[in-house]
Image: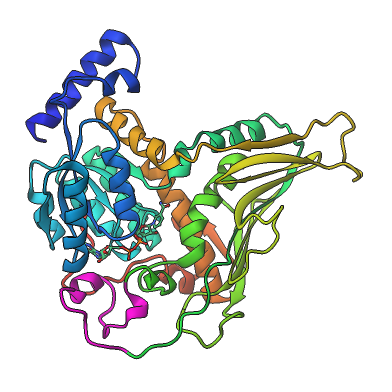
């Protein structure tokens, strides 16, 4: 920890003790309480995250790291414009982690890199903001949780809806029992803007890209632009597509609302129904049913249509109660009454649309910084991130096996299912190895 960070934490603790209050007073502290962050993976979400960090007082970007020199140069110029100071540039994240002036690291690489970079960052004592899904396999999720325990790291997972106030209001409303008994919860992501990805031949690696480093622990293969920036998400080697991408955000709230986290079984089905011959490996249409004994959770995704879910909501969660249905998405939430059914409640008061703040990401980053100062548990701590990434992987494993699977949360394995159990583990390509924790 550098002296600035020690200062940042010590002074903040004193201020907390003196005033007995938290974030706003802490952020108004002396100008030299600087937090220096390093960003690993600078293109899409990584840069959105960094911009949210730079909106916070006393935060500076000290370093950028990317295996694509083109991305690195472009983002370096943007950072210089934003903060008036050049960050150090790295192409090997291990060198960035050796830099003792970096207090906190943002890990926004593709999913197949999350675990290794995150564990290495925790080993060096840095605070960590790491993107969702927590990891690309259940084994890696478990190892990351163990690393956080061992190194006592401050870790925030990038599920920023956990800091968005209207989602908290949704959970409070459901927990108060306001819509009666809930037997069915639906979560969906309908990605209407997205069409097919045409098959293209493998090609030479673009200049400035260290493609072997980009692949890292994933299997070696020739460069193909479909499997690279952004569109890597449609390939199992690197990600778990919509179930693991939007799924972690939305299923998280489905389970948080129901306050039950371990399904008895999962059955997923679907396929490449829309674009059977295109380049995507992952299904463009998928439904996964999680059975919790006395209620079920349905995950439903499609590519190429928005559907007409509860008034054209392209994504969302719906808690279907006996008296009404609460529907929530990133823009807000409302409750529709169950007016004519046998279970309808005469005096039920529906809730008109309650708009969200649209500031979830900024608040999530602010929460992380507060936790670095105070030692409090971040809004999306590593256990929360691991639990929901596991739930998504269970659905993907069922889909890939084409059958129902039964999970044992104590043993962290499938019940009597050797074939499914093989899919719990990550298979790293040498020389990369999963660290021992
Ligand atoms: N929280 C959210 O709302 C949200 C939204 C979008 C994406 N994400 C997550 O962010 C992650 C990145 O997604 P994206 O869409 O930004 O991808 P992207 O392809 O746009 O960016 C990833 C960047 O990481 C770089 N990279 C790859 N391996 C690296 C390594 N070993 N070291 C340094 N840099 C490396 C790539 O070159 C690229 O610049 C994914 O895990 C995704 O699920 C989260």
The front one of 44 and 316 is 44
Which residue sits at x=40%, y=67%? 239
Query: Of all residues shown, which one is farthest toward the bottom?
Result: 201
Residue 133 pos. (x, y %): 41, 56
Is 132 in front, or is 436?
A: 132
Q: Locate residue 352, reporting x and y percent.
A: 72, 36
Residue 149 location, x and y as percent?
Answer: 28, 41
Residue 189 in which image quadrant: bottom right
Residue placed at 28% from the left, 43% from the top? 148
Residue 193 to residue 24: above or below = below
Q: Is residue 415 in sight in this rendering?
A: no
Q: Pinpoint residue 399: horizontal percent, then vertical percent.
A: 55, 72
Q: Residue at x 29, y 34 (%)?
A: 56
Does 196 lie within the magenta span?
Answer: no
Quadrant of the image occupied by residue 134:
bottom left
| Above-or-below relation of 323 to 398 | above
Q: Where is 176 relative to 274, above or below?
A: above
Please state, as top left, top right, bottom left or bottom right, where the N terminus lies in the image.
top left
Range of magenta residues: 202-228
In this view, the residue in front, 297 or 250, is 250
**Left or right side of 2 for 179:** right
């Amino acid at each position: 920890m550098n002296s600035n960070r020690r200062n940042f934490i010590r002074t903040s603790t004193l201020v907390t003790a003196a005033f007995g209050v938290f974030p706003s007073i802490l952020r108004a502290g002396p100008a030299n309480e600087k937090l220096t962050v390093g960003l690993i993976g600078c293109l899409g979400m990584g840069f959105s995250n960094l911009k949210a960090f730079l909106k916070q007082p006393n935060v500076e970007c000290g370093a950028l790291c990317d295996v694509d020199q083109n991305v690195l140069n472009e983002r370096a110029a943007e950072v210089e414009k934003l903060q008036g100071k050049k960050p150090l540039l790295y192409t090997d994240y291990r060198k960035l982690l050796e830099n003792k002036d970096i207090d906190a690291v943002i890990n926004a690489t593709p999913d197949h890199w999350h675990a290794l970079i995150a564990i290495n960052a925790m080993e060096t004592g840095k605070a960590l903001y790491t993107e969702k899904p927590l990891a690309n396999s259940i084994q890696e999720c478990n190892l990351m949780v163990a690393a956080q325990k061992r190194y006592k790291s401050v870790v925030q997972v990038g599920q920023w809806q956990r800091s968005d106030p209207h989602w908290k209001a949704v959970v409070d409303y459901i927990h108060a029992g306001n819509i009666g008994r809930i037997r069915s919860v639906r979560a969906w992501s309908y990605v209407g803007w997205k069409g097919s990805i045409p098959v293209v031949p493998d090609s030479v690696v673009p200049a400035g890209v260290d493609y072997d480093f980009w692949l890292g622990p994933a299997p070696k293969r020739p460069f193909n632009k479909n499997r690279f920036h952004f569109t890597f998400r449609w390939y199992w080697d690197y990600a778990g597509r919509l179930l693991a991408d939007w799924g972690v955000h939305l299923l998280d709230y489905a389970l948080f609302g129901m306050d039950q986290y371990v399904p008895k079984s999962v059955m997923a089905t679907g396929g490449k129904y829309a674009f059977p011959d295109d380049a995507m490996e992952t299904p463009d249409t998928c439904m996964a049913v999680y059975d919790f004994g006395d209620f079920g959770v349905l995950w439903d995704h499609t590519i190429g249509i928005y559907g007409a879910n509860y008034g054209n909501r392209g994504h969302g969660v719906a808690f279907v109660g006996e008296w009404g249905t609460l529907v929530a998405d990133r823009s807000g939430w409302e409750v529709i009454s169950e007016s004519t059914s046998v279970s309808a409640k005469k005096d039920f008061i529906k809730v008109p649309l309650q708009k969200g703040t649209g500031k979830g990401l900024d608040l999530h980053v602010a929460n992380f910084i507060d936790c670095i100062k105070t030692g409090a548990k971040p809004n999306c701590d590593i256990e929360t991130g691991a639990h929901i990434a596991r739930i998504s992987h269970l659905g993907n494993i069922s889909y890939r096996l084409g059958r129902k699977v039964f999970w044992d949360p104590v043993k962290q394995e499938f019940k009597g299912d050797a074939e499914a159990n093989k899919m719990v583990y990550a298979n790293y390509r040498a020389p990369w190895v999963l660290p021992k924790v």
